[in-house]
Image (cartoon, rainbow, N blue to C red):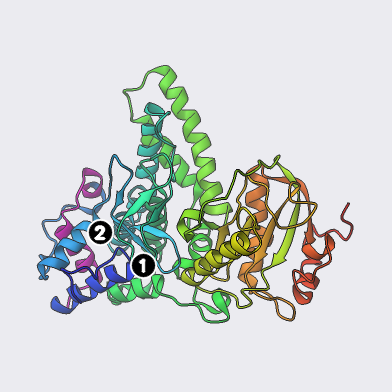
Amino acid sequence: MDWGGSTTTKHMKDFIRAVESTEAVNPGLQMLDVVKGLRKAAGFETELIKRYLGDLSDAHDLVANPSVTSYVREVINHSLSESGKEKGVVLTLDGSNVALAPMLLGLEAGLQSTVQGLYPLTLTHNLVASFLHHVHNEQTTVPFGTKGFWDSISSPKVYTLSDLPSLATDTLIIGGIDGFILGSEISTSNHRERSLSDLLKSYYSQQPDAAGLDASPRLISQKRRMNFKKLVSFSLLKSQMVQALTVRRNLNESERKRLDDVMNEGFDQFVHVYAVCPNIITRSQWGAAAFIGSPSYLSLPVPYLFIHHTYQPSKPCTTFDQCASDMRSMQHYHQQTNGWSDIGYSFVAGSDGNLYEGRGWNWVGAHTYGYNSKGYGVSFIGDYTSTLPIKSAMDMVRYDFTSCAVNGGRLSSSYSLYGHRQATSTDCPGNAFYREIQTWERYQSYLP
């Protein structure tokens, strides 16, 4: 691999290649030696890390090609620039963006069996710092979770925030969740005999086949939310955060009160976004073109949810690359051929574990004639005339999307669910799929 050249991108597969090349020239090391050695090579050490993982004096000096070392240093050290560029982030096969630092720290804590360090190193510290920073900079920051987008999906090099910054960006949280999952798994299992590159490959490079995620192994990044919910104790995470904030003595009474509010609201919102809602790929992440004209606001919460299939593309998409490409081609068709201002659907479900933002939560769509201003239209990529979408995609919309929409105040808690064909003469969402949704909780045969 040409490390010094332009072929190296900020993609997880390139980071895994760097790890493989390091392992090849440092034979016989355990996974913990490699993780610690990479951290030493990157010069990544803080007081917090020392408290839980000890210092780096006993870490191996890994033999490495200088260009590999400089790449490792660049991708492990996390930073945010004034202009909104976020460094220390890689794009993964499943379309999520991962900060490597908290992921590797979680793994190191698991390998050292210092499980009490797992929460602080992966999530608690970053969330607390972010909430504190927000209290002092309310106009110029958000509490947490700022998302961003790459200059190129196929060859990612520069990642830019698409909103106000936070000290716990989406990538730090996703990296923290992965570190938490991998650290928890490795501290209780026999994974430690594996190499680091092998573990990362099996977690991040799982290519679902036609059966999609239903037939995939459990410990893969596409199942991050499911694994996180099983392993995490939200009450422990919250009590650790409260504890971390009580040691901040330098706050006056009103700041402390404000911090309590920001933390309580922020924590609930964190659980909502990362444990209740599905993983939503934003427009800038799938490479959307701009809306043509000016959109109209939906009046929230809306009472109806309409289920569609795309018909074309007729094949389900099982990877982020494919689904993102399908989104761009549908948007192009809706804008250029149909003459609409944007892709018509509110959201689109892939078979890759992701929900794709179409017009999103706030804007009137063009999905169900006569009802666009009264409901969301969610479409499944594929033709479901005679087959069904994979179960994980159906469950994502049936349970996760609806809980997310109701809890977020966007879909009425007494909402009704319909198939597109109930509103207009169409076969959508396909005969097989329409029969299936008639068994879903909020399905109504009568559309007023």
Residue at 36 percent across and 36 percent down: it is 244
Residue at the extreme top of the image, as rendered = 253
The disc placed on residue 170 is none
Residue stretch rendered in magenta on the structure:
27-50
Residue 301 drawn above or below residue 312: above
Residue 414 placement, left or right of 93: right
Left or right side of 283 for 107: left
Residue position for label 2? 75
Q: Amino acid type of disc 1? A: Ile
Res 253 quadrant in image: top left
In the drawing, does residue 440 fall left or right of residue 320?
A: right
Q: Measured along the vertical axis of the image, is residue 66 above or below residue 243?
A: below
Q: Are marks 2 and 1 in contact (CB under 8 Å)?
A: no
On-image quarter of the N terminus: bottom left
Q: Is residue 46 left or right of residue 11?
A: left
Q: Which residue is mark 1?
A: 186
Find the distance from the CA under tag 2 to the CA under tag 1.
23 Å
Q: Is residue 49 magenta?
A: yes
Percent from the top left, x then y, of residue 414?
78, 47
The residue depicted at 50 percent of the width and 68 percent of the height is: 325
Q: Principal SS element in the magenta part?
A: helix
